[in-house]
Image: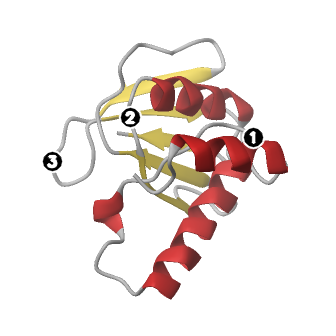
Amino acid sequence: GWLSPDELAALKESGDYDPDTHMEDGSIAGFSAEDQELMRQQILNHLNQLDPLLKAIVDVELKRGNRVSSAGNDYPNAGSINVTMSLPFTDQYASSDVIFSLCNDPHYWYADYSTLGNPQHLLIC
């Protein structure tokens, strides 16, 4: 992954990013080192904006070995944040505040969790 355990610890101590996070190499490996760093920072920025309920799921998934492969904004609504995990979710996290949807479409994704508010935030695998 992008960040070693020591780098994760240093990042957490710096206060620049709270949750443990890794990014999957494959999603940006074909880009220059400068572009990779820019993409890495964009992913971290999106993770910092992700709804706390979904961020908590990301934290659990990362601790279980899953990885963040991409992140974006303005989908599905203006102001939305979306984060994609590289593997299927390892557990069920649905609650009264977080909705689970099984898409199971190879053209899109396998499943997602979404928030109820507007703008809607998505955590995808």
Residue 118 pos. (x, y %): 71, 45
Residue at the image point whose x is 49% and y is 40% from the top:
123
Q: Residues within 10 Å of mark 2 (few under 14, many from 20)?
A: many
Q: What residue does disc 1 label?
A: 18
Residue farthest along the left direction in this orientation: 106
Secondary structure, mark 1, is: loop
Residue at the image point whose x is 51% and y is 15% from the top:
94
Q: Is residue 78 visible?
A: yes
Q: What residue does disc 3 label?
A: 106
Foreground residue among 116 and 49: 49
Q: What residue does disc 2 label?
A: 66
Task: Tell me: 54 left or right of 13.
Answer: left
Secondary structure, mark 3, is: loop
> On the image, which quarter does residue 88 sit in?
top left
Q: Amino acid at mark 3?
A: Pro
Secondary structure, mark 2, is: loop
Mark 3 vs mark 1: in front: 1
Residue 82, which numbered label?
A: none
Q: Residues within 10 Å of mark 1 (few under 14, many from 20)?
A: some
- For the residues labelled 2 and 3, the Cα–Cα distance comes to 19 Å
Foreground residue among 82 and 101: 82
Residue at the image point whose x is 67% and y is 45% from the top:
50
Residue 122 pos. (x, y %): 53, 43
Q: Residues within 10 Å of mark 3 (few under 14, many from 20)?
A: few
Specify how the rendered protein is coloured: secondary structure
Residue farthest along the front direction in this orientation: 6
Q: Amino acid at mark 2?
A: Asn
Decide which of tag 1 and tag 2 comes sooner along the chain: 1
Q: Amino acid at mark 1?
A: Asp
Foreground residue among 47 and 41: 41
Quadrant occupied by the C terminus: top left
Decide which of tag 2 and tag 3 comes sooner along the chain: 2
